[in-house]
Amino acid sequence: MENNNQTLTGFLLLGLFPPSRIGLFIFILIVIIFLMALFGNLSMFLLILLDVHLHTPMYFLLSQLSLMDLNYISTIVPKMVSNYLFGNKSISFIECGVQSFFFLTLAGAEGLLLASMAYDRYLAICFPLHYPIRMSKKVCVLMITGSWIMGSINSCAHTVYALHIPYCRSRSINHFFCDVPAMLTLACMDTWVYEYTVFVSTTLLIAFPFICIACSYGRVLHAICHMHSTEGRKKAYSTCSTHLTVVTFYYAPFAYTYLRPRSLRSPIEDKILAVFYTILTPMLNPIIYSLRNKEVMGALRRVIQRICSV
């Protein structure tokens, strides 16, 4: 009976902020990053929507990345900030399941979307004449829809499993959000089957797409080296380096966290790594893609001029 009561009353999130001035500083920093991520991703999404010059497959995919990042960081940070401000670390069992579901859905979908963006650049640079046919609007829609569906299916399987196992230890989750592996350390049953499924799903949604991205950019770099146009080579290098920066910030800490066995993981290290792919990456993506992209900056000037003229 006690076990069921603990399950129904929910969990306690120990959080990211230590009870000191350093904790307050980290809290303020996280809030600033959150606001920057909201403004940056919303601006990118609206800019691509409003400017017809950006209605291309690459920017269509980029608008979806901004939409995912907007939801991604909103799934994690508001609850974390609320718990810190009100001194309440509790999260209900249902809230924990909902947060876990959306986090895993967006994480998996974003991993697949980044692979789609790499494929888009591969076609644009290596097969420019076939690009309009191979990368049509229909193909883009299928890629985005497939990313959301596969992310949702994977998330649903993990979340349902986590909500149906018995929890009989301390209710304190040593994390700042309901990360399923962190939740399962509180389970009173052997979870080796789940750990195996985590390895498989991380391989399929993170490691395999990363290998595809690496192969795509290997071919892209080879094609760039044989370009005769200096301007074209410079533009291609800029686009590829931008995407590779985003990919590194997202995939590396994610894969390092979830592909390790539980015996080699530590809660503190997991929380630090989680900051990269849940908080920093959604903030950095719009900055990297806007400040280093002349087409985006040009579109921004056109939209501002249009607004001022109205």
Image: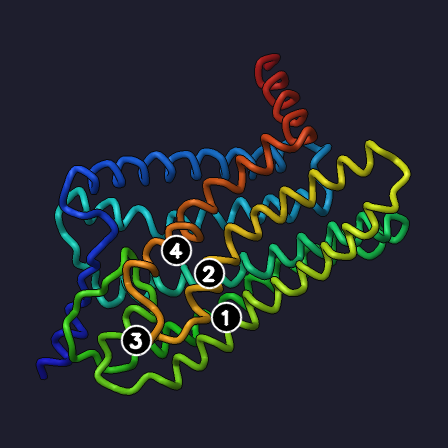
Q: Residues within 10 Å of mark 4 (few under 14, many from 20)?
A: some
Q: Nearer the viewer, mark 1 or mark 3?
A: 1
Which residue has dot 1 on it?
A: 202
Q: Is residue 180 above or below residue 109?
A: below
Compared with 305, 134 (above or below) is below
Q: Look at the numbered disc 2 and give the secondary structure of its residue.
A: helix
Query: Which one is earlier in the sequence, the residue at label 2 or at label 4?
Result: 2
Disc 1 marks which amino acid?
Thr
**SS at circle 3:** helix
- Sequence-wise, the earlier of marks 3 and 4 is 3
Residue type at numbered disc 2: Phe
Residue underneath mark 2: 254
Q: Give above or below for 190 relative to 158.
A: below
The reply to whether dot 1 and dot 2 touch (C-beta < 8 Å) is yes
Q: Report which quarter residue 54 is drawn in.
A: top right
Q: Earlier in the sequence, mark 2 or mark 3?
A: 3
Residue 109, percent from left and from top: 54, 60
Residue under label 4:
273
Q: Amino acid at mark 3?
A: Leu
Callout in the foreground (4, 1)? 4
Q: CA distance from mark 1 to mark 3?
A: 20 Å
Q: Which residue bears the numbered disc 3?
A: 163
Q: Name the residue type under label 4.
A: Leu
Q: Are marks 2 and 4 in contact (CB under 8 Å)?
A: yes
